[in-house]
Amino acid sequence: MRGVDDASANGRSFTIGDTDFLLDGEPFRVLSGAIHYFRVHPDQWADRIRKARLMGLNSIETYVAWNAHEPIRGEWDASGWNDLGAFLDAVAEEGLYAIVRPGPYICAEWANGGLPVWLTADDGIRLRSSERGYLAEASRFLRRVYEIVGPRQIHRGGNVVLVQIENEYGAYGADKDYLEALVAVTRDAGITVPLTTVDQPQPQMLRDGSVPGVHLTGSFGSRASERLATLREFQPTGPLMCMEFWDGWFDRWGGHHHTTDPAEAAAELESMLAAGASVNFYMFHGGTNFGLTNGANDNGRYHPIVTSYDYDGPLDEAGSPTAKYFAFREVIARYASVPDELPATGSPSPQVTVELHPAGDWMPVAGESGTRSDSPPTFDELGFDGALVRYEVDLPEMTSPQLLEFGEVRDLAWVRVDDGPPQRLSRRSNDRAVAVAPGRLLTVLVEDQGRVNYASHIGEPKGLIGSVHLGGQPLQGWRATTIDVESMARQVQVDDCRTADEATQSPVVGPVALSGGFVLEERSDLFLDTTGWAKGFAFVNGFHLGRYWSEGPQRTLYVPAPVTRAGSNHLVILELEHVAAATAHFRHSPLLGYRDE
């Protein structure tokens, strides 16, 4: 058996036997669901966890996002949304066990795969490897996590039964020294519950991502029998487990809304449970990429991920049970005890119209500040983990339009000469050049649309990459100004109380801030309709809901009830391009994409 060897004060244990997980020495099937505490408002944790129990689950799994806990090097935060301990305690209070997957890399369609920008900006560090610098920082992070997890292990009176080493490492590398070092750090920190790895059931990935003494699990969403058979070849004893049963999928801007058929997903679940396997639903409840936390993928073309992480899971983005919830519950009931109680279905959200007041250009005044350098610095060189940087440079005399060429734009840029109309360059289209007219000042506003969370592009710098040429000659003497959208939104709220213009139904050209007040009878989940707006960021009562973009598929932003108030509330929109009408609508239900209509 693998796991706890020492006797515990409370007599509880969780180990790996020859064929099963063993809870207090008895066979135990893990029926788990993924909820990421950092994607769900803390006041809503208990509701989501309780609904997991009512579906028949006995465990909750979560990643740990390093960049959420330590966005600034050396400044550790485990409070509020980052209170992992409180989340694990909430799981325990509902009578459920917990699985913790701290990475340090997590993927998760989360910015930078969970790795902090201050870490990935260090050119001397080789990510996800046994290189000394990276391993030192990763070990320091893990020890902080294990200070929280350790006392909550089952044999110490808590509910944590499994801890994962790294995450789908076989899809990235084959540095066994690295994996063994993570195991050593984990054990030295007092983690004695069984350890696992996870990889897609492909021979190369299972070989490269595994390490002796650590239990292998799989990640897949279809062909369950075949996947489990492959997994069994590499894990000949012990329980079979799908650590990520992909019951849905994530969306990207410019794509369609992904859904999977509940009956087909339930049939795959049936296949796994009939084979005696344990399962973790990825996701049980996806939540939201609030603020600027969305990731991106790049497999030859860059695709940023939308704000919603609904994932078409058993609980939707607002925590309401879906058809898939009840289909899964029915299957689980054939293999395990399921509570008689059913969760309440969600009620329609209030429909509210908000008249918006244009509050002016929210950008800092051009030329007043910024870092100066010969070439445009990247976001990373500026030490900036935000959405926008404005680059400015004085233009030489020109008598005719010239071709402006960039090494690369990451990820979206608006190019403007003096007060002329902006021209947009997109990384997704591999745009790298534009013709510009004569003028005095060139301004390039660049948006980081989301840091890549998977494969070789993890940790890449953002902004203007390389030198910039005009008419074949390098442009030098740049000024770079970082723009913190959350600070800008707070300033708009203050200013709006004093200087807001009258509301207008006319189209408004950006960049422009729009704000307005609205009244609720009670705190409520809301769905902000962004139809007619081009691109920007939205805030309710100072809370950053995230990005919106007319490219879709997502057309509403979820507003969790705890950020609203009974009585007066305030909405701020920071629009980058234009709005068709300065009016906001809160809908009764979400619009996540074309498949919903």
Image (tube, rainbow, N blue to C red):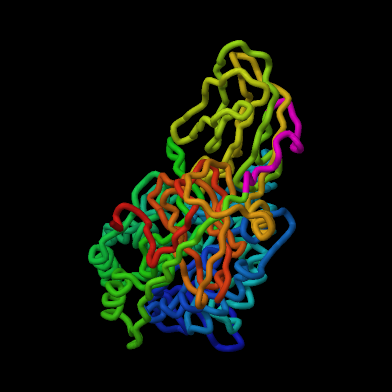
Residue at image location 54% in from the left, 69% down from the top: 41
Is residue 276 or residue 502 the one in the foreground? 502
231 above or below 453? below
Q: Position of residue 81 (x, y in %)?
A: 60, 68
Q: Position of residue 296 (x, y in %)?
A: 48, 46
Taking the image as drawn, is residue 179 in sight? no
425 above or below 548? above
Can residue 324 be found in the magenta stretch? no
Q: Position of residue 451 (x, y in %)?
A: 55, 46
Residue 50 found in image quarter: bottom left
Taking the image as drawn, is residue 408 in sight? yes
Residue at image location 61% in from the left, 32% down from the top: 444
Q: Residue furthest top?
A: 399
488 above or below 83? above
Q: Is residue 353 left or right of residue 273?
A: right
Is residue 116 or residue 198 the one in the foreground? 116
Q: Quadrant of the C terminus?
A: bottom left
Total number of numbered labels? 0
Can residue 362 be found in the magenta stretch? yes
Q: Position of residue 340 (x, y in %)?
A: 33, 88
Is residue 197 or residue 488 the one in the foreground? 488
Residue 38 found in image quarter: bottom right
Residue at image location 53% in from the left, 66% down from the top: 518
Q: Is residue 553 left or right of residue 423?
A: left
Magenta segment main secondary structure = loop
Q: Which residues are magenta?
A: 360-375
